[in-house]
Image: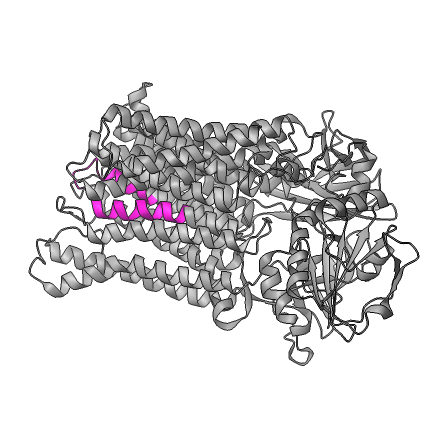
Amino acid sequence: MSLRFQRLLLIMLTLVIILSAVLLILYNARENVSYFYTPSEIDKSEITINKIIRIGGFVENDSFNKISSSKFKFRITDEKASILVTFNGILPDLFREGQGAVIEGAFVDNDIFNATNVFAKHDENYMPASIKEDLKGTGYWNKKYK
Amino acid sequence: MAWSDNNDVFRFNSSYKKMRRIFILTPLIVLLIICTFLLTYLLSGKDPNKPPSALLNKDVPIFESSSLYNSMEIIKTIDIKNKKTLINFFASWCSPCKIEHPLFFEIRKKYPELYLLGFNHKDPTADAKEYLENDGNPYDFVGVDADGLIALEFGVFGLPETYLINDDGKIIFKFMGPITKDVLKNEIEPLL
Amino acid sequence: MSSLVGFLSLVFAIGINFYLFLSRYIFKFQKHKFNLFVRFSSLLTLLSFFSLMYAYVVSDFSNYNVFQNSHSNKPLIYKISGTWGNHEGSMLLWLSILSIFSFFFSFTKNIEESFQRLTLIIQSLLHILFGLFIVFTSNPFLVNSILVNEGLGLNPILQDPGLAVHPPILYGGYVGYSIVFSIAIAGLFQDRDDEWLYVAKKWSLISWTFLTGGIALGSYWAYYELGWGGWWFWDPVENISLMPWIAGLALVHSLMMVRGEQAIKKWIVFLSILCFSLSVFGTFLVRSGILTSVHSFAADASRGIFILLIFFIVTGFGFLVFLLKEPKKSNTLNLLFINKVSAIVINNILMIIATLTILLGTIYPIIIEVLYNKRISVGGPYFNATVIPIMIPGFLLMSIAPILSWQTNKIQNSKKYVIGFFILSIMVLIQSYFLDFNTWGFIGILLGFWIIFASIIAIFSSYKVKFTIKFFQIVNPHIAHIGVGIAIIGITCSSVFQNELDFNINEGDKFNVNGKTVLFEKIETTNQINFQALRAKFLFDIEKNQSKKIEAGKNYYPVSKMITSEAGILHQWNKDIYFILGDQKNDEWFVKVLINPFVSFIWLGVIIMMYSGLIAVTRR
């Protein structure tokens, strides 16, 4: 077998693999990519039911409602708009009212968003206001300034 | 293709050589493109983790507070209604506050007409005074928020937090955590 | 005090590396002296690292980094791991591991002296770049401006033995590729013989083994700590560790070809540069905070730009040298269709394409946001649907590749394999027909068994079984592939045949899991040193005398006001039963039970792969 033929074959094979990879990527990029919105970016008139999207914002204060031990209802807001969310499952450890959260799921009708995943965010360098009392409580917090 | 090392067959084929160059150049080009995108992204200052602010474009909450140095001196919401005000919540026990502290002197120098209002959050008076003595006092007025009620009105989650109020008495900017030079330059100054 | 020592030794180490770097042009050293200086700078970097660790161990809160990330109540092991549990410390760890690799490389015997020196000079350059990064943007030795007696505590989610050792091992892999990178670049400048390829092989195997261990530890941690019942989420942070891993696998396989007579040097150099670039890229993405990830990291744009610059310099430099200094022509690449070389070439193509697919999916959201100002997220389904189909032909190939010959077209005992494959297919088909048929399940299980089966036939029909070191070295590739087969079975079963059960129950209730009765005994809270524990106690299989206890719950860390979930896992050889405690309403608790079949196979497979990696290092 000549070297030229071998090389040709190799290049052909590579191209075929690359082509199928590109096709796969294009197809999946259309199907499996979810868009990210804030509540006010969602146009109520253009909601596509059951299309998976992500919404990021705050958990609205006093909106959290426990229906049962595994069913929750709360609102996600960016202060300009807010969206009613239902969730079935286990909320992340950092989920709290007033805290930032990202939810993934789909609208089941024009007003209710059913979340399949809830992610909560926490900044590791940021200092919760109530921390001082805890430190005081353990008796370790004696401060002196230079 | 990089793995086809043998040149024997194509030794005299110049178009092949050109093609090879292009193939070898590909990684560099890809690198350039990726870096361009990443740099644009970094410089655009987008932060996927940042939640939108809860109180933006709302009126300043009603508050009333006495001065740290003179309990007879009172500041109320109405006092800041028609001047641009920067409100900063701080405490002597809060180490991130210490980091942002020098920046307020810079702001003061650069924008003398801006009213700087500091709220001392859940702090014994003596500690707060000592803190401001050691690090300097950049504020026009230091209000006492000993029980944290004012912070509650503002929806303060942690210390430090900074709010910018325009001359209509609306909150136009809020920042959680210590402000930095970048935040000052890119987010606060354009609003002043 | 320790901060001062640490900072000075760090700066001094960087200074020595400047000196070493310039030594090529200005100062001339004798070999002996040069290596001594390399070792000295390594020890200084380590001294710097250990003085930071010392500050953590003695809870020296005058160090700002310690104050931010530690607490005197923490158990000793987490004080130690706190050293690298934050950005600054982890970058110092990165630099220290770089130094350790240079240190050991300076002892390499069977390599030309000038080549070794050139490699170490490139290492010095890397040391300088990352050292300056630490000094200017992430100095862990800053002195606290206020005097305090207590720290702010480590992120409790990081207080876990698995995660404590995860970063050093993972970095062992990432940074290990720096030496491979340096060797490859040196090889471009000074390509006299093939000796450097053997050295590169050794180091890339070591790095790859570390990286495998690091990734496995990370996903094992995610499995029992995050409480989501899965072990791989195609999270960006995971993807960026997977990319150098796959590229490194391609590199290890290409380096095998050196043993056959055709060295494909240029490709090897390309892969070496790629591996390290991807490692630095991974560091950049994690540390710049560009990625929206479920694992949260602190973000800082100025750091991001600095690392982006380093990434650009390192990768650009690598590929530029690659462009200007092509390796001399090596022997003819002879592709005889069905031989080992063509199998490895195809495997390499597939792996690189898989790597690029992951890369594209990971940075796609960034590109879209820059171009269209729209935010998207690319999740697991995309990666599953693109990466897996690309990898499948590679898996098919790997089952027979080790028995292919280097030179000829013959497969020994080809009949055995064909018959074996058919029998196996029918068996798996029948088996999966009785369990509900699932295409991916069928393909995965068939592939896994086929790889194991073919490798075993190959071992027994081609070699005499002896229990000597030499025998294990010879059959090592087959063993590695058996490991992959086992892992594939585990991955397929645990993801395709996972079963989820939800219960809303009160204390004292009984419920049914997989035909076994489970008793929800009680809820208990206890106070530990640095956290409060809430535990739900379950008794699994109460009909039997030896019923198993399972505890699932949450920990509350008062110092940082955080709650973490602790899943309760009952390990059995063929399945994991995974309990997650949810929320409570009145007296009713929500409990989620996941049945993950054959998860243990994944870890077993990974251990076998790592074992093979180590054995391969010993072999020339």
Which picture quadrant has residue A41? bottom right
In the image, residue B20 above or below residue C515: below
Q: Residue furthest left?
A: B12
Magenta segment main secondary structure = helix
Q: Is residue C269 magenta?
A: yes
Would you say C431 lies left or right of C65 here? Answer: left
Q: Which residues are magenta?
A: C250-279
In the displayed structure, C452 sits above or below B39; it is above
| Residue situated furthest bottom in the rendering | A45
- Residue C150 lies, in percent from the top left, at 72, 34
Q: Please state the total of marks drawn on the protein image.
A: 0
The residue under the point 44% across, 58% down is C386
**Nearest to the observer: residue B139 or residue B20:** B139
| Residue at 68% in and 73% down | A40
Q: B103 or C509: nearer the eye?
A: B103
**Nearest the eye: C192 or B85:** B85
Task: State the residue at coordinates (65%, 44%).
Answer: C227
Q: Position of residue C611 (x, y in %)?
A: 41, 29
Residue C606 painted magenta? no
Q: Residue farthest to the right?
A: B72
- Image spot of residue C240 (x, y percent): 46, 49
Q: Quadrant of residue A81?
A: bottom right
Any part of residue C27 in sight: yes
